[in-house]
Image (spheres, rainbow, N blue to C red):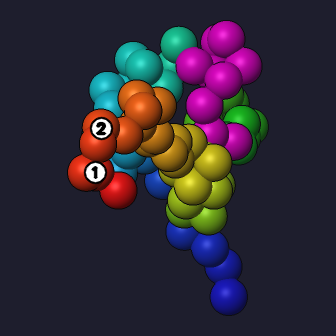
């Protein structure tokens, strides 16, 4: 089974980002993994976008001490 590849526009839409953001991230060697095909075409695999999003999850923690009566 051949996996479907996404172009920049579709990948950006899936990540809720602009195409320009993906372009800058590639230039800075950041962001999700991508494929560079013959002729310079850039494509993204769904699994790479999913891994990128999973790795970008941040936990929030309240570092304030609990007030009396709070648990």
Give x and y (percent) for residue 28.
67, 11
Asked which secondary structure carries label 1, the reply is loop
Say which residue label 1 marks.
70
Give x and y (percent) for residue 60.
44, 41
Left or right of residue 5, residue 30 in this image? right
Left or right of residue 44, residue 28 in this image? right
- Between 1 and 14, the residue placed more toward the observer is 14
Q: In which quadrant of the rendered view does residue 25 lie? A: top right
Task: State the CA–CA distance, disc 1 to disc 2.
Answer: 6 Å
Say which residue label 2 marks.
67
Q: Is residue 67 visible?
A: yes
The reply to whether callout 1 and callout 2 are in contact (CB within 8 Å) is yes
Determine the residue positioned at 30% across, 38% down.
67
- Between 25 and 68, the residue placed more toward the observer is 68
Left or right of residue 14, residue 44 in this image? right
- Between 41 and 68, the residue placed more toward the observer is 68
In this rendering, the answer to whether 55 lies above or below 25 is below
Determine the residue positioned at 33% across, 32% down.
17
Determine the residue positioned at 53% across, 13% down.
24
- Between 17 and 40, the residue placed more toward the observer is 17
């Amino acid at each position: 089974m051949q996996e479907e590849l996404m172009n920049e526009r579709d990948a950006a839409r899936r990540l809720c980002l602009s195409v320009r953001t993906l372009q800058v991230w590639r230039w800075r060697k950041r962001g999700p993994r991508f494929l560079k095909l013959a002729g310079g075409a850039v494509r993204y695999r769904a699994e790479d976008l999913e891994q990128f999003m999973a790795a970008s999850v941040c936990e929030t923690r309240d570092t304030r001490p609990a007030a009396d009566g709070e648990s």
